[in-house]
Amino acid sequence: MHVLIPAYEPDKRLLDLIRQLKASGVSNILVVDDGSGEDYGPLFHAAESEGCTVLTHPVNRGKGRALKTGFRHLLETTRMDMVVCADSDGQHLPQDILKVAQAVRETPGRIVLGSRQFTGKVPLRSSFGNTATRRIYSLLSGIPLQDTQTGLRGYSRDMLEWLCQVPGERFEYEMNLLLQASKAGYSFYELSIETIYIDHNSSSHFRPLADSLKIYWPIAKFGSVSLISALLDILLVLLIQYGTGNLLIAVWGARLCSSVFNYTMNKTFVFNSGKPTPSKRSMPRYFALAIVILILNYGLMFVLFGQMGTPLLAAKLLTEAMLFAFSYWCQQRFVYA
């Protein structure tokens, strides 16, 4: 096995982890210096003195790129059977790294995740971030995972080429990996590990705003396309009604045009993972889903407003929120899969 550690401006905890792994019998450790700079040179030289292979990015390129640099190096220069990725900040114990390695051996074809349980004193930003990301991931994929942001992950050799092709350069890479795994034919195995935060996780280089936007970018794209489609539908209703004086033509003509626009944008912009689904397969599925959603829209409105007495505006907003999530899930898993 190999252990891959991406590192950006690390401290002595990186060396502590390396020494603990060596003491535990791990001899193959690859460290990727992600543009930490000259001030950190002595620390990486010390890692080399401990027997590690160290690769260096001249400038900071992000955790995703550092991981892909490591995967490519292992693929091209070694015959390793597996790799376990761990963070450099002391949050992953050697015994947990070894547990993940053992799980990779015992569960072929599955990505092994070292999942934290978030019990005890967990920093607020870490608790909130993990809870939000876990729920959004479940919404996007339909797969419930305990810890979507864990950096402790194990992969078998046959996954390396795919890992190098997953899009993303920074923290969004690990979320993209989870989102695309099922399409690549890989499932997950979660292994409970210790939850460790040192100094309230102050050493983390995660940027709450910028990196969160990248992580949530898939659903943000879907939402923006849905909003533009709705505005286009309204505009076309007004224009066609003004030009023809026929409300039926205006409503159906506007809905047809906005649906074609929505389909095209989702196919090329939102759900395009490099291998787009042929239109002859995705288009019938899309419009079949549109009919289902139309029926569900009426059904939910009838129950909430007509039967339960929910105020009309609240019923409409609740209905649209539920169907938004349902539509995203269906389009990702069925229409454009």
Image (spheres, helix red, strand yellow):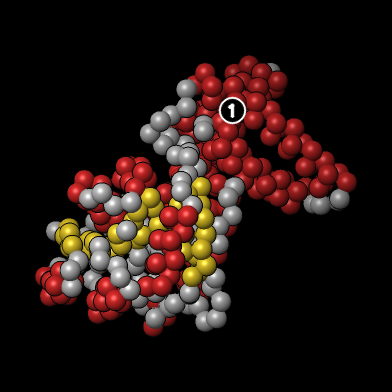
Q: Is residue 205 left or right of residue 47?
A: right
Q: Is residue 34 left or right of residue 21?
A: left
The residue located at (35%, 65%) in the rendering is 86
Q: Nearer the viewer, residue 124 or 6?
A: 6
Picture coordinates of residue 303, whole percent (x, y): 83, 44
Asked which secondary structure carries label 1, the reply is: helix
Q: Is residue 250 visible?
A: no
Type of amino acid under label 1: Tyr
Give the residue number, with chain letter if any, for mark 1: 286
The quarter of the image holding the N terminus is bottom left
Picture coordinates of residue 182, whole percent (x, y): 50, 42
The residue located at (55%, 62%) in the rendering is 146
Picture coordinates of residue 311, whole percent (x, y): 79, 51
User: Residue 64, relative to residue 126: is it above or below?
Assistant: above
Q: Is residue 288 left or right of residue 221?
A: right
Q: Nearer the viewer, residue 59 or 154?
A: 154
Residue furthest right as drawn: 307
User: Residue 306, relative to residue 111: is it above or below?
Assistant: above
Q: Nearer the viewer, residue 108 or 313?
A: 108
The residue located at (79%, 38%) in the rendering is 299
